[in-house]
Image (cartoon, rainbow, N blue to C red):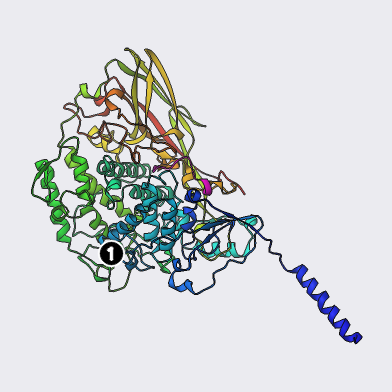
Amino acid sequence: MNTKYLCLIFGVIWCNSVLKAQRPQIKPVRKQSIHPRDKIKFFHLVMERLNEPISLRKGIDRDTAFSVPPEYHSDRFQTVDIVDRSGFPGSLQQVDIKRIKLPDIASPMKLDWKENFSIFLPAHRQYAAELVKIFMEMENVEDLLSASVYCRERINPYLFVYAMSVAITHRTDTLHLPLPSLAEVFPDKFMDRGIFSKARQEANIVPPGSRVPIEIPVDYTASNLDPEHRVAYFREDIGINLCHWYWHIIYPGQGPFPMNGTDRAGELFYYYHQQIMARYDFERLSNNLGRVERFIDWHKPIKEGYFPKLDNILASRVWPSRQANSKLQDINRKIDQFELDIQDLERWQDRLYDAIHRRAAIDDKGNTVPLTENTGMDILSHILQSTILSINQNYYGQLHNFGHLAISWIHDPDGRNLEGIGVMGDTAVSMRDPVFYRWHKYIDDIFQELQNMFPRYTAQQLDFPGVTISSVDVVSKGAPRNEFATFWQKSDIDLYRGLDFTPRGSVFARVTHLQHAPFKYIIEVNNDGPPRKGTLRIFMAPKYDERGVPMLFRDQKHLFIELDHFTVRMDPGCNKYERHSIESSVTVPSERTFSNLNSSDTRKEEGFAYCGCGWPQHMLIPKGTTEGFPAELFVMITDYNIDKVEQPPPEGCQQPFSYCGWRRRLFPDTRAMGYPFDRMPRAGVSTLQQFLTPNMKVVDVKIRFNKKVVASRYTI
């Protein structure tokens, strides 16, 4: 053969060998099939990167692949070869999706992919109820996973995640599966829209091990020229908004009866939102603001404006704003199948007050239903919310829900500008808006009208004979006795679940939030009788009003925030109890909100020990002031034999119950929620000291705020 050709051949072979050596080598992976009963742990991957096809590899390390029947893909992807060819060493978990009889989802599919979903809107609630019913009726976890994969690419993502979350929370076979944080699934609902371009840049350019958190400015929605912005750290706190969204997942208002018939669910709605209002007023007083003025006049302009600075990434548009001094108008949104006259709200309000003053409501058959001490708050709440358990929705209407909607569309009541719903229409973001608190102060006043009709507690009803609280102290880390210490802290949230079509690996956003130093209560109780059990109830309220004047009890009782609620055993004589702040019956750990930069992501795979709804631990104590905000800590012990509910405790995970109850259990206390502050005081009581009985104790405390900013507990 010609030497020239031999040299050419050997040259080509040499070049190919060099190029092959330089080309990234894709290592073969060992596929592992998953047993059907173990597929429960993959639901969080179905709710990841919802714009991406399900067949693309999932997980932070792309180590999981769903093997999906072609017909399960949306029409767009059924004829496209979707293969993730990126190579990763190690094993690949292959999740085989079983073929099932495909559910009829024609109705839920009517909600456009880019629309925001609202549980307050009747059409959307119906879509959600139908989808939840489909998921709830799946025979087992494997069928549920198949149904969710089929629906994922066809259903509006917000509706899909809502329905999946409700089903997972209420099915017996997924009851203890923690949900992925909504702030990770839809980060655009919770943080400054300006960070997402930076997050995508970080994900595409910087390898996972070298990425740095993207700082979110503290004051990105407004400046202190707006007095309401002083409490934006509370309204816009991610943990608080997540808690509100999750509460409405546990109590969805519409759907298969068992999930709506949860014990005292209506009363819980009242108490949870009453506590939100008490906490918000506490924060306002800490910032030299007056207590919330309730919404009272349907025709008076709403003086507060709100500019959320949030993106709706799916729709590629921003959330609408509300200008200051906007007025409510009749709503006629044909595209949303929704019409409302403001007169309807006024009419429903009058009918509710009539029922309260009669101490009886009228059901849909014309029968009289008494509003008693034991059931009245529960019945009234279902009427106000217009849940499936409302006794007469046609007559009493949907005051709470439609009030939210009237405010949500105040910027575009007839849809002429094609604007979407405002933040007041979404439970995940509604607490960001100052008007949320004015509206719920109005709703709470309706509940209080009924509470004030009930008989007042006598001193004998409040007392626990033979039991006295001799001392109460608070020991807070790094602070004087009976003083709480608060400060700012920076923490991180992993955005990877919500960043579609970007390289895998964590991308963190860093937020600044309120935090308190760990503390414990030291309580001494004297028992003059035999061994017995008691319930310790711990509350706190501001000592002075806006004018610096000591509060009258009738006002102060609305501002007591619950801090803890637990059972103790008392031996004869003196008993000493220590209770740490992290044990609170009110809160869930901060890890339910924030991420650990040092973790190997086992948290995301295995979930938390807490699977219930609860107030975020970092917001347990209000901000206070630099000079020390004066407050009163109230401790009461009650007779456990009266309080107790005979039932086994929840299994599998911890569920703080004070604000959310126990799923699939009775509320673990027979007393009225908020007891003993749920009724008007007995005759002759005008101050907290006059209200006390021997089984109660009040101690003066201070909440001292330090302006320092503590770095994240987790460092890179």
Q: In which quarter of the image is residue 679?
A: top left
Check the image and report above or below for 663 versus 702: below
Label count reads 1
Q: What stretch is highlighted in magenta?
A: 604-614
Where's residue 140, x and y in %? 41, 50
| Quadrant of the rendered image containing residue 505 | bottom right
Residue at 19% x, 57% y: name it. 298
Whether residue 225 is visible, yes or no, is: no
Q: Say which residue appears at 42% left-offset and 22% top-offset.
A: 577
Q: In which quadrant of the rendered view does residue 357 lie? A: top left
Q: Which of 677 and 528 is in front in this view?
A: 528
Q: Where is residue 606 drawn, in percent x and y?
A: 52, 45
- Please report the residue visible at 15 percent of the width from the left and 51 percent of the height from the top: 392
Question: Magenta includes 228?
Answer: no
Compared with residue 527, is residue 20 higher up or lower down, i.e. above or below?
A: below
Query: Is 607 one of the magenta-colored residues?
Result: yes
Task: Kindly identify the amino acid type of the residue bearing the numbered disc 1.
Answer: Trp
Q: Residues within 10 Å of mark 1 (few under 14, many from 20)?
A: many
Q: Is mark 1 on a helix, strand or loop?
A: loop
Left or right: 693, with 221 as reference point? left
Q: Is the magenta stretch mostly helix, strand or loop?
A: loop
Percent of width and height locating residue 632: 34, 31
- Is 550 left or right of 369, judged from the image as shown? right
User: Which residue is depicted at the point 88% across and 82% down?
Assistant: 6
In-front residue for pair 264/470: 264
In this view of the protein, can residue 597 be seen by the observer?
yes
Vertical position of residue 588 compared to residue 100: above or below: above
Tell me where residue 112 appears, x and y as whole percent: 35, 69
- The residue under label 1 is 409
